[in-house]
């Protein structure tokens, strides 16, 4: 996987993130040689997961641009509901979508894709409870471990993380 070395990836963080959905991609991507930054609403802020595990934001979304990254990953849990309250996060994702960057979201993460209006006509999955939100945003719901539609990669739950990572690597290879 030499082609993935030095790819620049942002992983979004906010309070109540799902532990595995943040840390599994961070560690797998770093292991593959990617340059991963944890991006949150505030630089240097520590955000607790649903289970209390801390993740420190290395940089603020207001201090980076979509052009700084090849991909952005949106973990689930309840953090997407908090993330979409920050204009800087929404702007980063909208710009990344417009630039065709890989946007990968798992569990409740596709809520962010709904909020940025980038899934109209795209095949999408996520945690079953957000199906109505995805469809109301114009997404085409599929109940699969991982759905890749162009630059959009989505998965349902932590059990789908291996397929999610395969989808991310595949989308990054095509980007």
Image: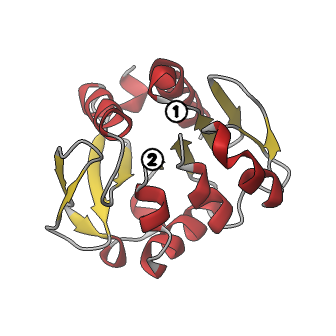
From the viewer's perspective, tell me whether residue 41 is left or right of residue 48: right
Residue in the picture at 27% in, 31% down = 33
| Distance Cα–Cα, label 2 vs label 1 | 9 Å
Total marks in image: 2
Please say if the residues under marks 2 and 1 sit with CB atoms less than 8 Å apart: yes
Which label belongs to residue 73?
2
- Among the 4 quarters of the image, the one containing residue 97: bottom right
Q: Is residue 10 above or below residue 3?
A: below
Q: Is residue 80 above or below residue 71?
A: below
- Among the 4 quarters of the image, the one containing residue 175: top right
Between 108 and 103, the one nearer to me in the picture: 108
Residue in the picture at 60% in, 56% down = 111
Q: Position of residue 138 (x, y in %)?
A: 83, 56
Dot 2 or dot 1, earlier in sequence: 2
Q: Position of residue 131 (x, y in %)?
A: 73, 45
- Residue annotated with mark 1: 168
Q: Position of residue 115 (x, y in %)?
A: 63, 67
Which label belongs to residue 30?
none
- Dot 1 alpha-carbon crowd within 10 angstroms: few under 14, some 14 to 19, many 20 or more: many
């Amino acid at each position: 996987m030499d082609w993935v070395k030095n790819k620049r990836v942002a992983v979004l963080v906010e309070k109540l993130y799902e532990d595995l959905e943040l840390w599994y991609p961070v560690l797998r991507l770093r292991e593959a040689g990617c340059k991963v930054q944890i991006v949150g609403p505030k630089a240097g802020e520590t955000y607790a997961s649903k289970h209390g595990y801390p993740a420190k934001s290395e940089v603020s979304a207001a201090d980076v641009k979509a052009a700084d990254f090849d991909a952005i990953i949106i973990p689930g849990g309840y953090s997407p509901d908090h993330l979409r309250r920050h204009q800087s996060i929404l702007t980063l994702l909208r710009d990344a979508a417009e630039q065709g960057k890989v946007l990968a979201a798992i569990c409740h993460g596709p809520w962010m894709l709904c909020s940025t209006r980038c899934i109209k006509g795209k095949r999408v999955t996520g945690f079953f409870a957000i199906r109505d939100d995805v469809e109301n945003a114009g997404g085409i719901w599929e109940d699969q471990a991982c759905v890749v539609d162009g630059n959009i990669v989505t998965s349902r739950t932590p059990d789908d993380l291996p397929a999610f990572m395969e989808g991310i690597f595949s989308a990054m290879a095509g980007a």
